[in-house]
Amino acid sequence: AAARGRCPGCGSAALVEDALYAQQQLVCAACGCVLSEGLLTTTYTEEEHLREVAYSQSTGQKEQLSRCLQRGIRRVQDLCKVLQLPAVFEETAVSYFQRALQLPAFHLVSLEKKELLGGCCVFVTCRQHNWPLTMGTICSLLYAKQELFASVFLSLQKELGLSVPALSLADLVKTHLSSFRLFQPAADVPAPFLEDKEKLVARTMGIVELASDTWLVTGRHPVPVVTAAAFLAWQSLQPRARLSCPLARFCRVAGVDLPPPAHLR
């Protein structure tokens, strides 16, 4: 076996690093013996001991994580700008993303889940600051399936030990109804469909509160409940012109998803 830091051929300690065609080599200056070559994941210190370095201990993985981190941070920042969130929200979400990416639990996940991780960090930040943002809204921005987004969100919450308060029904009503296309005249929105936003929000809130008091909301997805309440509130504001309108057409004109049957949710 070679002595520590010495050429195994002649015993000389004159070992030098030489780059041949961009491949690092460790060469004995006395006899020209090549001790190691092409070890792209080694350092000079390790080569003194004639040992290869595992990829996970080399700069290769760090560079890969660094690129992933940079892309993720840009994605978080872009999402915050689209949602017009305050600067402090962006800083918090970026901080969560940086912490999460350092955890082994998120090193080997799929690229799709890593892309959703940034959205989860934004979602958590908004919830913690009582900013009305639904999972459905952020999933539509990311073109993500809610089931997959929810799994990443739960993993993030568990791994970072985060406390995430639930969105109140009042905030959910205001946020969900703000996406309805019923408050401004448009070519594809018939005149009978137009309604005053404040009136619709107030009446929808009353129906949702009544449903909550009678336990109709408990154990159900809240967004379909709010959509149904908004539909009933909208019909009640002008019953003669609107009672004949089915829920499917209302959702299509309002630009919101038609809630699927309960057994499919």
Image: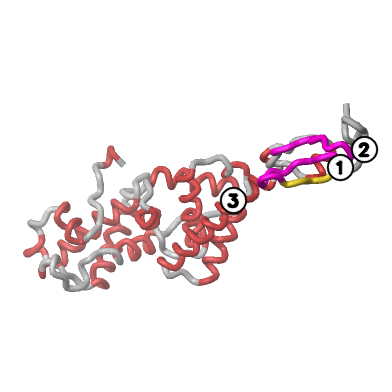
The disc labelled 3 sits on which kind of residue?
A: Ala
Q: Which residue is mark 2?
A: 12
Dot 3, crowdedness within 10 Å: few (<14), some or many (≥20)?
A: many
Q: Which residue is mark 3?
A: 100
- Pointer 2 and pointer 1: residues touching (CB < 8 Å)? yes
**How many labels sit on residues?**
3
Report the quarter where the C terminus lies. top left
The disc labelled 2 sits on which kind of residue?
A: Ser
Mark 2 lies on a secondary structure that is loop
* Residue pictured at 46% horizontal, 55% vertical: 119
Residue 198 in which image quadrant: bottom left
Reply above or below: 245 against 218. Answer: below
Asked if residue 8 lies in the magenta stretch, the reply is: no
Residue closest to the far front: 31
Q: Which residue is mark 1?
A: 29
- Pointer 2 and pointer 3: residues touching (CB < 8 Å)? no
